[in-house]
Image: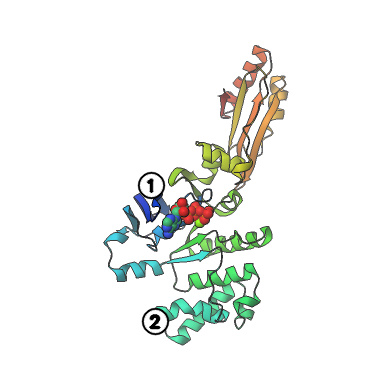
Protein backbone atom coordinates (compact mmCIF):
# COMPACT_ATOMS: atom_id res chain seq x y z
CA UNK A 1 0.00 0.00 0.00
CA UNK A 2 1.26 3.46 -0.90
CA UNK A 3 0.12 6.93 0.09
CA UNK A 4 -3.26 7.65 -1.50
CA UNK A 5 -4.30 3.97 -1.83
CA UNK A 6 -7.55 2.88 -0.24
CA UNK A 7 -6.27 1.45 3.04
CA UNK A 8 -9.78 0.99 4.44
CA UNK A 9 -12.95 0.50 2.45
CA UNK A 10 -16.46 0.28 3.79
CA UNK A 11 -18.75 -1.26 1.20
CA UNK A 12 -22.52 -1.20 1.72
CA UNK A 13 -21.77 -1.58 5.40
CA UNK A 14 -24.67 -1.74 7.84
CA UNK A 15 -25.06 -2.46 11.53
CA UNK A 16 -28.29 -3.28 13.31
CA UNK A 17 -28.36 -3.88 17.05
CA UNK A 18 -31.01 -6.29 18.24
CA UNK A 19 -32.18 -5.10 21.64
CA UNK A 20 -34.99 -6.16 23.94
CA UNK A 21 -36.90 -3.04 22.93
CA UNK A 22 -36.47 -3.66 19.22
CA UNK A 23 -33.91 -3.29 16.47
CA UNK A 24 -31.66 -0.24 16.31
CA UNK A 25 -30.40 0.52 12.85
CA UNK A 26 -27.13 2.25 13.79
CA UNK A 27 -25.54 2.21 10.31
CA UNK A 28 -27.14 1.80 6.92
CA UNK A 29 -25.42 1.33 3.57
CA UNK A 30 -22.17 3.06 4.44
CA UNK A 31 -19.76 3.44 1.52
CA UNK A 32 -16.54 5.20 2.37
CA UNK A 33 -12.91 4.83 1.35
CA UNK A 34 -10.10 6.00 3.60
CA UNK A 35 -6.90 6.94 1.85
CA UNK A 36 -3.53 5.81 3.16
CA UNK A 37 -1.62 8.69 4.72
CA UNK A 38 -4.64 10.97 4.99
CA UNK A 39 -6.44 12.47 7.95
CA UNK A 40 -10.09 11.52 7.55
CA UNK A 41 -12.75 13.25 9.61
CA UNK A 42 -16.12 11.75 10.43
CA UNK A 43 -18.57 14.23 11.85
CA UNK A 44 -22.16 13.97 12.99
CA UNK A 45 -24.54 14.76 15.79
CA UNK A 46 -24.90 12.61 18.89
CA UNK A 47 -26.38 9.21 18.07
CA UNK A 48 -25.64 9.51 14.34
CA UNK A 49 -23.60 6.29 14.39
CA UNK A 50 -20.02 7.59 14.53
CA UNK A 51 -18.72 5.34 17.31
CA UNK A 52 -20.43 2.34 15.79
CA UNK A 53 -18.78 3.11 12.47
CA UNK A 54 -15.32 3.37 13.96
CA UNK A 55 -15.83 0.15 15.94
CA UNK A 56 -16.89 -1.62 12.76
CA UNK A 57 -13.67 -0.51 11.07
CA UNK A 58 -11.59 -2.63 13.42
CA UNK A 59 -14.27 -5.28 13.96
CA UNK A 60 -14.83 -4.52 17.63
CA UNK A 61 -18.36 -4.59 16.22
CA UNK A 62 -19.10 -6.96 13.38
CA UNK A 63 -21.23 -5.29 10.70
CA UNK A 64 -24.55 -7.00 10.03
CA UNK A 65 -24.32 -6.31 6.30
CA UNK A 66 -21.73 -5.30 3.73
CA UNK A 67 -18.01 -5.42 4.16
CA UNK A 68 -15.00 -3.72 5.65
CA UNK A 69 -11.76 -4.14 3.73
CA UNK A 70 -8.41 -3.45 5.33
CA UNK A 71 -5.52 -3.25 2.88
CA UNK A 72 -7.73 -4.84 0.25
CA UNK A 73 -8.82 -7.81 2.35
CA UNK A 74 -12.28 -8.26 3.81
CA UNK A 75 -12.22 -8.60 7.60
CA UNK A 76 -15.23 -10.88 7.28
CA UNK A 77 -13.09 -13.39 5.38
CA UNK A 78 -10.27 -13.34 7.91
CA UNK A 79 -9.62 -15.92 10.63
CA UNK A 80 -9.82 -14.70 14.23
CA UNK A 81 -6.05 -14.55 14.30
CA UNK A 82 -5.93 -12.43 11.16
CA UNK A 83 -8.58 -10.09 12.55
CA UNK A 84 -6.48 -9.66 15.71
CA UNK A 85 -3.45 -8.88 13.55
CA UNK A 86 -5.42 -6.37 11.48
CA UNK A 87 -6.67 -4.80 14.70
CA UNK A 88 -3.11 -4.40 15.92
CA UNK A 89 -2.47 -2.33 12.81
CA UNK A 90 -5.26 0.00 13.89
CA UNK A 91 -4.58 1.78 17.18
CA UNK A 92 -7.48 3.47 18.92
CA UNK A 93 -7.94 6.35 21.37
CA UNK A 94 -11.07 7.51 23.15
CA UNK A 95 -12.64 10.54 24.80
CA UNK A 96 -12.15 9.04 28.26
CA UNK A 97 -8.53 7.97 27.62
CA UNK A 98 -9.12 4.45 29.05
CA UNK A 99 -5.74 4.19 30.74
CA UNK A 100 -4.94 1.48 33.27
CA UNK A 101 -4.92 3.27 36.63
CA UNK A 102 -2.88 0.59 38.42
CA UNK A 103 -0.02 0.86 35.97
CA UNK A 104 2.50 3.67 35.61
CA UNK A 105 2.89 5.41 32.26
CA UNK A 106 5.66 3.16 31.03
CA UNK A 107 3.62 0.05 31.82
CA UNK A 108 0.51 1.53 30.23
CA UNK A 109 2.42 1.88 26.98
CA UNK A 110 4.10 -1.55 27.20
CA UNK A 111 0.71 -3.21 27.82
CA UNK A 112 -0.25 -3.88 24.16
CA UNK A 113 3.31 -5.08 23.52
CA UNK A 114 3.05 -7.57 26.40
CA UNK A 115 -0.14 -8.90 24.85
CA UNK A 116 1.60 -9.16 21.48
CA UNK A 117 4.36 -11.19 23.16
CA UNK A 118 7.15 -8.65 22.69
CA UNK A 119 10.18 -9.22 24.92
CA UNK A 120 10.15 -6.99 28.03
CA UNK A 121 13.30 -5.01 27.33
CA UNK A 122 12.29 -4.31 23.74
CA UNK A 123 8.82 -3.30 24.87
CA UNK A 124 10.28 -0.85 27.38
CA UNK A 125 12.58 0.69 24.80
CA UNK A 126 9.68 1.17 22.41
CA UNK A 127 7.52 2.66 25.18
CA UNK A 128 10.26 5.12 26.15
CA UNK A 129 10.63 6.18 22.54
CA UNK A 130 6.89 6.83 22.26
CA UNK A 131 6.61 8.63 25.59
CA UNK A 132 9.39 10.86 24.35
CA UNK A 133 7.50 11.48 21.11
CA UNK A 134 4.46 12.66 23.07
CA UNK A 135 6.59 14.78 25.41
CA UNK A 136 6.21 12.75 28.62
CA UNK A 137 9.59 11.09 28.91
CA UNK A 138 10.18 12.60 32.35
CA UNK A 139 6.88 11.27 33.72
CA UNK A 140 7.27 7.56 32.95
CA UNK A 141 7.01 6.49 36.60
CA UNK A 142 3.87 8.56 37.22
CA UNK A 143 0.42 7.03 37.40
CA UNK A 144 -2.52 8.24 35.29
CA UNK A 145 -4.17 9.92 38.30
CA UNK A 146 -1.18 12.29 38.46
CA UNK A 147 -1.76 13.64 34.97
CA UNK A 148 -3.95 16.29 33.34
CA UNK A 149 -6.47 15.29 30.69
CA UNK A 150 -4.21 16.36 27.85
CA UNK A 151 -1.31 14.39 29.31
CA UNK A 152 -3.52 11.33 29.72
CA UNK A 153 -4.49 11.55 26.07
CA UNK A 154 -0.80 11.75 25.15
CA UNK A 155 -0.19 8.50 27.02
CA UNK A 156 -3.17 6.94 25.25
CA UNK A 157 -1.70 8.04 21.92
CA UNK A 158 1.69 6.55 22.82
CA UNK A 159 -0.01 3.31 23.84
CA UNK A 160 -2.06 3.20 20.64
CA UNK A 161 1.12 3.62 18.59
CA UNK A 162 3.07 0.93 20.47
CA UNK A 163 2.35 -1.86 18.00
CA UNK A 164 3.32 0.37 15.10
CA UNK A 165 -0.15 0.68 13.61
CA UNK A 166 -0.85 1.97 10.14
CA UNK A 167 -4.07 3.61 11.24
CA UNK A 168 -5.01 5.57 14.34
CA UNK A 169 -8.73 5.67 15.16
CA UNK A 170 -9.67 8.61 17.38
CA UNK A 171 -13.19 8.58 18.82
CA UNK A 172 -13.90 12.07 20.24
CA UNK A 173 -10.28 12.19 21.42
CA UNK A 174 -10.40 15.89 22.24
CA UNK A 175 -14.00 16.25 23.38
CA UNK A 176 -13.09 16.23 27.07
CA UNK A 177 -10.31 18.80 26.66
CA UNK A 178 -10.21 22.59 26.74
CA UNK A 179 -9.51 24.44 23.46
CA UNK A 180 -5.80 24.99 24.12
CA UNK A 181 -5.17 21.37 25.04
CA UNK A 182 -7.33 20.29 22.10
CA UNK A 183 -5.06 22.22 19.78
CA UNK A 184 -1.95 20.59 21.25
CA UNK A 185 -3.41 17.11 20.83
CA UNK A 186 -4.54 17.87 17.27
CA UNK A 187 -1.05 19.18 16.47
CA UNK A 188 0.39 15.93 17.82
CA UNK A 189 -1.99 13.86 15.68
CA UNK A 190 -1.00 15.90 12.63
CA UNK A 191 2.67 15.33 13.39
CA UNK A 192 2.10 11.58 13.74
CA UNK A 193 0.32 11.63 10.40
CA UNK A 194 2.99 13.64 8.62
CA UNK A 195 6.15 12.28 10.16
CA UNK A 196 5.19 8.64 10.69
CA UNK A 197 2.78 8.34 7.77
CA UNK A 198 0.03 7.01 10.02
CA UNK A 199 -3.47 7.31 8.55
CA UNK A 200 -5.61 9.11 11.13
CA UNK A 201 -9.39 8.80 11.43
CA UNK A 202 -10.93 11.48 13.58
CA UNK A 203 -14.47 11.09 14.90
CA UNK A 204 -15.92 14.30 16.24
CA UNK A 205 -19.01 16.41 16.60
CA UNK A 206 -16.94 19.62 16.36
CA UNK A 207 -16.42 21.24 12.99
CA UNK A 208 -13.39 23.08 14.37
CA UNK A 209 -11.58 19.75 14.79
CA UNK A 210 -12.24 18.83 11.17
CA UNK A 211 -11.04 22.24 10.02
CA UNK A 212 -7.88 22.00 12.08
CA UNK A 213 -6.45 18.74 10.80
CA UNK A 214 -8.56 16.79 8.32
CA UNK A 215 -7.91 16.35 4.61
CA UNK A 216 -11.24 14.67 3.92
CA UNK A 217 -14.52 14.60 5.78
CA UNK A 218 -17.62 12.43 5.82
CA UNK A 219 -20.78 13.79 7.38
CA UNK A 220 -22.86 11.10 9.02
CA UNK A 221 -26.49 11.68 9.80
CA UNK A 222 -29.09 9.22 11.07
CA UNK A 223 -26.98 6.15 10.23
CA UNK A 224 -26.16 7.35 6.69
CA UNK A 225 -23.30 9.22 5.06
CA UNK A 226 -24.94 12.46 4.00
CA UNK A 227 -21.94 13.72 2.06
CA UNK A 228 -18.19 13.31 1.90
CA UNK A 229 -15.14 14.68 0.14
CA UNK A 230 -12.14 16.98 0.60
CA UNK A 231 -12.69 19.36 3.52
CA UNK A 232 -12.28 22.47 1.38
CA UNK A 233 -14.98 21.26 -1.04
CA UNK A 234 -17.51 20.12 1.52
CA UNK A 235 -16.96 23.28 3.55
CA UNK A 236 -17.28 25.67 0.66
CA UNK A 237 -20.37 24.09 -0.78
CA UNK A 238 -22.23 21.77 1.57
CA UNK A 239 -24.87 19.94 -0.42
CA UNK A 240 -27.08 18.65 2.34
CA UNK A 241 -29.15 20.23 5.05
CA UNK A 242 -27.11 18.53 7.78
CA UNK A 243 -23.88 19.69 6.10
CA UNK A 244 -25.07 23.27 6.08
CA UNK A 245 -26.21 23.04 9.69
CA UNK A 246 -22.93 21.61 10.89
CA UNK A 247 -20.73 23.93 8.88
CA UNK A 248 -22.62 27.16 9.32
CA UNK A 249 -23.41 26.36 12.91
CA UNK A 250 -19.89 25.29 13.87
CA UNK A 251 -21.17 22.02 15.26
CA UNK A 252 -23.94 23.43 17.38
CA UNK A 253 -26.73 22.62 14.98
CA UNK A 254 -29.43 23.23 17.54
CA UNK A 255 -28.50 26.88 17.63
CA UNK A 256 -28.97 27.38 13.91
CA UNK A 257 -31.96 29.35 12.82
CA UNK A 258 -32.95 29.69 9.19
CA UNK A 259 -31.45 32.87 7.85
CA UNK A 260 -34.12 35.50 7.42
CA UNK A 261 -33.34 37.71 4.45
CA UNK A 262 -36.19 40.08 5.22
CA UNK A 263 -38.92 40.84 2.73
CA UNK A 264 -36.74 42.51 0.17
CA UNK A 265 -37.93 41.75 -3.34
CA UNK A 266 -34.55 42.32 -4.91
CA UNK A 267 -32.75 39.32 -6.36
CA UNK A 268 -30.15 37.74 -4.12
CA UNK A 269 -27.12 35.70 -4.99
CA UNK A 270 -24.92 33.38 -3.03
CA UNK A 271 -21.24 33.87 -3.78
CA UNK A 272 -19.29 30.72 -3.17
CA UNK A 273 -15.74 30.90 -1.92
CA UNK A 274 -14.03 27.71 -2.94
CA UNK A 275 -10.47 28.46 -2.09
CA UNK A 276 -9.12 29.97 -5.30
CA UNK A 277 -10.10 33.54 -4.56
CA UNK A 278 -8.81 33.36 -1.04
CA UNK A 279 -7.63 36.81 -0.19
CA UNK A 280 -9.35 38.92 -2.81
CA UNK A 281 -11.58 41.68 -1.54
CA UNK A 282 -14.44 40.61 -3.82
CA UNK A 283 -17.10 42.93 -2.45
CA UNK A 284 -15.06 46.10 -2.63
CA UNK A 285 -13.92 45.08 -6.13
CA UNK A 286 -17.56 44.77 -7.17
CA UNK A 287 -18.48 48.12 -5.74
CA UNK A 288 -15.51 49.80 -7.37
CA UNK A 289 -15.55 48.18 -10.77
CA UNK A 290 -19.34 47.95 -11.23
CA UNK A 291 -20.05 51.23 -9.56
CA UNK A 292 -23.04 49.61 -7.91
CA UNK A 293 -23.95 49.05 -4.28
CA UNK A 294 -24.36 45.57 -2.82
CA UNK A 295 -25.89 44.69 0.48
CA UNK A 296 -24.35 41.76 2.36
CA UNK A 297 -27.16 39.80 3.97
CA UNK A 298 -25.23 36.89 5.29
CA UNK A 299 -21.65 35.74 5.31
CA UNK A 300 -19.94 32.67 6.54
CA UNK A 301 -16.43 32.35 5.30
CA UNK A 302 -13.49 30.79 7.00
CA UNK A 303 -9.98 29.85 6.23
CA UNK A 304 -9.27 26.20 5.63
CA UNK A 305 -5.71 25.18 4.84
CA UNK A 306 -4.92 28.79 3.99
CA UNK A 307 -7.83 29.13 1.58
CA UNK A 308 -11.05 31.02 2.02
CA UNK A 309 -14.11 28.82 1.88
CA UNK A 310 -17.72 29.48 2.60
CA UNK A 311 -20.43 31.64 1.20
CA UNK A 312 -21.83 35.11 1.23
CA UNK A 313 -25.38 36.06 0.35
CA UNK A 314 -25.74 39.52 -1.15
CA UNK A 315 -28.72 41.48 -2.30
CA UNK A 316 -28.39 42.97 -5.77
CA UNK A 317 -29.31 46.60 -6.44
CA UNK A 318 -32.79 47.66 -7.61
CA UNK A 319 -31.56 48.67 -11.00
CA UNK A 320 -31.49 45.76 -13.46
CA UNK A 321 -28.58 47.36 -15.24
CA UNK A 322 -26.50 47.55 -12.05
CA UNK A 323 -27.43 44.01 -11.10
CA UNK A 324 -26.33 42.77 -14.51
CA UNK A 325 -23.03 44.58 -14.20
CA UNK A 326 -22.39 42.69 -10.99
CA UNK A 327 -23.29 39.24 -12.31
CA UNK A 328 -21.23 39.95 -15.42
CA UNK A 329 -18.30 40.93 -13.23
CA UNK A 330 -18.58 37.71 -11.22
CA UNK A 331 -18.79 35.55 -14.33
CA UNK A 332 -15.90 37.20 -16.06
CA UNK A 333 -13.77 36.85 -12.95
CA UNK A 334 -14.64 33.17 -12.54
CA UNK A 335 -16.27 33.71 -9.20
CA UNK A 336 -18.90 31.08 -8.51
CA UNK A 337 -22.35 32.24 -7.53
CA UNK A 338 -25.91 31.06 -7.66
CA UNK A 339 -29.27 32.69 -7.38
CA UNK A 340 -30.97 32.46 -3.99
CA UNK A 341 -34.64 31.70 -4.24
N1 LIG B 1 -24.37 -1.86 21.79
C1 LIG B 1 -25.48 -1.23 21.37
N2 LIG B 1 -26.69 -1.75 21.51
C2 LIG B 1 -27.81 -1.13 21.08
N3 LIG B 1 -27.80 0.05 20.48
C3 LIG B 1 -26.61 0.67 20.31
C4 LIG B 1 -25.39 0.05 20.75
N4 LIG B 1 -24.38 0.89 20.44
C5 LIG B 1 -24.93 1.96 19.84
N5 LIG B 1 -26.27 1.83 19.76
C6 LIG B 1 -27.21 2.78 19.14
O1 LIG B 1 -26.76 3.06 17.83
C7 LIG B 1 -26.96 4.42 17.52
C8 LIG B 1 -25.65 5.08 17.15
O2 LIG B 1 -24.83 5.14 18.31
P1 LIG B 1 -23.33 5.65 18.29
O3 LIG B 1 -22.78 5.44 19.66
O4 LIG B 1 -22.60 5.02 17.16
O5 LIG B 1 -23.53 7.20 17.99
P2 LIG B 1 -22.46 8.39 18.02
O6 LIG B 1 -22.61 9.11 16.73
O7 LIG B 1 -21.13 7.86 18.38
O8 LIG B 1 -23.02 9.32 19.18
P3 LIG B 1 -22.21 10.24 20.26
O9 LIG B 1 -21.80 11.48 19.52
O10 LIG B 1 -23.25 10.53 21.29
O11 LIG B 1 -21.05 9.45 20.77
C9 LIG B 1 -27.64 5.05 18.73
O12 LIG B 1 -29.01 5.04 18.52
C10 LIG B 1 -27.26 4.10 19.85
O13 LIG B 1 -28.23 4.11 20.86
MG1 LIG C 1 -19.83 8.19 19.98
| Residue 132, disc | none
Numbered circles on residues, count: 2
Q: Residue at left 56%, top 29%?
A: 336
Label 2, secondary structure: give it: loop
- Quadrant for the N terminus in the image: bottom left
- 1 vs 2, front mark: 1
- The answer to whether residue 301 is seen in the rendering is yes
Q: Residues within 10 Å of mark 2 (few under 14, many from 20)?
A: few
Against 337, is 156 above or below?
below
- The answer to whether residue 52 is seen in the rendering is no
Mark 1 → mark 2, Cα distance in angstroms:
38 Å
The residue singled out by tag 1 in the image is 28
Against 188, is 282 above or below?
above
- Quadrant for the C terminus in the image: top right
> Where does the image place residue 168, in percent across and percent down from the top left?
47, 63
Front in this rendered view, residue 140 or 22: 22
Q: Residues within 10 Å of mark 1 (few under 14, many from 20)?
A: many
How is colour applied across the structure in the image?
rainbow
Front in this rendered view, residue 13 or 125: 13
Label 1, secondary structure: give it: strand
**Location of residue 74 (image quadrant):** bottom left
The residue singled out by tag 2 in the image is 117
Give left or right: position of 203 versus 224. Answer: right
Front in this rendered view, residue 247 or 277: 247
Give left or right: position of 152 versus 221. Answer: right
If you read the primary sequence from the N terminus, does the residue marked by circle 1 or circle 2 appear first?
A: 1
Asked if the residue at label 1 sits under 8 Å from ligand 1, the reply is: no
Amino acid sequence: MAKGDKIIRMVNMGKTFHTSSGDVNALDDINLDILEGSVQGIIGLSGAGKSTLVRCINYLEVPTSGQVLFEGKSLGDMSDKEVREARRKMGMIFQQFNLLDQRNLLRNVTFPLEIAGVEKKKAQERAMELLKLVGLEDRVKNYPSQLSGGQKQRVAIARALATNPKVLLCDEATSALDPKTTKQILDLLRKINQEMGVTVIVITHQMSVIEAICDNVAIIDHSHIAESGPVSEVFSNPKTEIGRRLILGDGNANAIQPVNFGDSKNPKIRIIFDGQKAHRPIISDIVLSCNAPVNILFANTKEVEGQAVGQMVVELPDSVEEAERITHYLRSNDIRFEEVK
